[in-house]
Image (tube, helix red, strand yellow):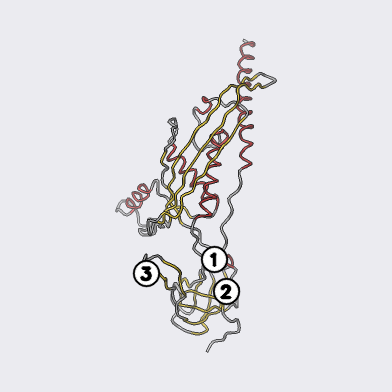
Amino acid sequence: MKRVHLQTCARLTRSALAGVVILALTGCVMTLVDTIPSLPDNVHAPVVAVTSFENRSSFEGQWKLGDGMADVLVTELIRSRNYAVVERQHFEKLVSEINRQQSGLFRPEGKTPVGKMKGAQYLIRGVINDFSQTGGGGLSVAIRSFMFLGHGYKARVSLTLTIVDIETGQIISSVQSTGIVRTREAYAQGTYKGVTFGGDIFFATPLGQATQRAIRSGVREITSEMPHNPWRPMISCIQNTTIIINGGKDRDFREGTVYLVRGPAQPITDPATGDVLTFVPGPKIGTLRITEVDEKVSFAVALQGGNFARGQWMSKADPKAKGP
């Protein structure tokens, strides 16, 4: 009985050691992936939606690559802090829940209001061109040593990411990204059985690391190609004699600063194509002075003028400006 117990422990030890070695040797590659640069502070984060990827690779296996790859891209976009990502893959479920809450079955308190969903500016759609692993060999594990057999594996994931302007339907850019991971150790195909796409164990495998490299490379390319709308100081609202501005300490507003206020900017379009070429500031409205600065908003009072309204642009004026 004791002998059987020792044999069982030996088998468990060999299995555990094999898993540790595979995870350790494949996982070390992940530290080589570069980080994604941040957007400048003076731009708005683009609002994007991601659709399920089209799988044009020859892979047919346990994973739904289209939905899984889109989820990995969403995670990386959010992690970069460069984008506001809105739900589109499960959009109908959101709409269904909002509509359900409007029925008389639910109490009025806590209902989700209608008409508050954020619209996307850009759609990112993806194509999986390659999702493959080649090579062969095996792994022999003993109690005190490991022996690698075969010539190892090469995992390759290739993607095409396309950015579409939702307002115009125009394709802004289409970028290619590829992730390649070579491993000296043999990684048996059967090891992927029971592995969830996008999980920690998946990203410790050659295919998982190649996926992460391809996605991160794609996000870097997207960030360099995505149009960026510059942030501008503007009037958010007016409460009695207090004017509230759309920036505070986060935008380096300071008490006492005087701003010139203009009407909404006027778009200049190409008469042949209708494309917006640039914006010009509206007419001068007056001046105001910052009196209090909060974390994300500032409060101001009027110095000159009186027709202030939400959406008017602001620019720094002469700090010595005085009221009438």
Circle 2 — which element? strand
- Point out residue 58 in the picture as x, y percentages from the top left corner: 43, 32
Rounded to the nearest angstrom, the CA distance separating label 2 from label 3 is 44 Å
Three-letter code, disc 2 = Glu
Which dot marks residue 271?
3
Which amino acid type is shown beneath numbered disc 3? Pro
Give me the residue at 58% from left, 55% from top. 38
Front residue of this view, candidates 51 and 170: 170
Frontmost of labels 1 and 3 is 3
Residue 217 position, x and y percent, is: 55, 46
For disc 1, the marked residue is 296
Side of 98 where 6 appears, left or right: right
Please, which residue is most extreme toward the front here? 272
Residue 124, placed above or below residue 291: above
Which numbered circle lies on residue 182? none
Tell me the residue at 59%/77% (across/down). Answer: 257
Query: Residue farthest to the right?
Result: 144
In the picture, measured across the screen, residue 248 lies left or right of residue 268, that is: right
Q: Quadrant of the N terminus?
A: top right
Q: Which residue is mark 2?
A: 292
- Distance from disc 2 to disc 1, alpha carbons, whole Å, reads 11 Å
Crowd band around label 3 with a 10 angstrom C-alpha radius: few (<14), some (14–19), many (20+)? few
Label 2 CA crowd tier, 10 Å (few <14, some 14–19, many 20+): some
CB-based contact (under 8 Å), mark 2 and mark 1: no
User: Disc 2 or 3, which lies upstream in sequence?
Assistant: 3
Which residue is at a point 46% across and 78% down the rendered structure image?
240
Q: Earlier in the sequence, mark 1 or mark 3?
A: 3
Closer-to-camera residue (307/112): 307
Q: Residue 122 occupies which quadrant of the picture?
A: bottom left
What's under tag 1, amino acid-wise?
Lys
Q: CA distance from mark 1 to mark 3?
A: 39 Å
